Amino acid sequence: GHVDRAATEQVAEFISKHGNSRFQPIDGSDNTVIHNRAGFKRDVGLGATEYLIPAATWRNEVCLGLNPKTVAGLLISKGYLVPDSAGKASRSETLPGLGKTRCYIITEAIFGGDDV
């Protein structure tokens, strides 16, 4: 529905707007200092990228004005968010400089247009 589409677009828009400036490559391939970091990105092969967004950023920025749990559930159902093995929306990942952190992993499939 309309609300689902708006929520998906909000997340996609956040990543497309900040993907280069505020997401740090997780492998350390780029030494650029990231100001106001929103998360990390990693290459998952075949030119595909995943975006790892810490839970606080997910709540406070990415899902601003939305219910973060609802958005996560929606994106899992669309295949845009990678849940953990138990089906939880957030996963514990080891992040450079942060250690183990609960984060939400968004795949770039979210940019693949819009299956209304």
Image (cartoon, rainbow, N blue to C red):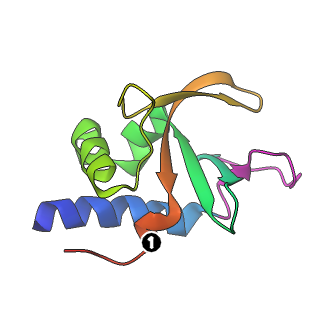
Q: Residue at x 63, y 64 (%)?
A: 48
When the figure is inspected, residue 90 is found, relative to residue 2, above or below; the finding is above
Q: Main secondary structure of the magenta part?
A: loop
In this picture, which residue range is highlighted in magenta?
Answer: 20-36
Q: Residue at x 82, y 50 (%)?
A: 33
Towards the viewer: 63 or 78: 78
Towards the viewer: 27 or 65: 27
Q: Is residue 89 magenta?
A: no
Q: Position of residue 107 (x, y in %)?
A: 50, 57
Q: Position of residue 103 (x, y in %)?
A: 51, 34
Q: Residue at x 26, y 42 (%)?
A: 73
SS for callout 1? helix
| Viewer can see residue 57 | yes
Q: Position of residue 81 (x, y in %)?
A: 41, 48
Q: Is residue 66 left or right of residue 110?
A: left
When the figure is inspected, residue 90 is found, relative to residue 52, above or below; the finding is above
- Residue where numbered disc 1 is placed: 111
When the figure is inspected, residue 6 is found, relative to residue 74, above or below; the finding is below
Q: Residues within 10 Å of mark 1 (few under 14, many from 20)?
A: some
Q: Position of residue 65 (x, y in %)?
A: 25, 48
Q: Looking at the image, which residue sits at the far bottom?
A: 113
Q: Quadrant of residue 30?
A: bottom right
| Quadrant of the image containing the C terminus | bottom left
Residue type at mark 1 is Phe
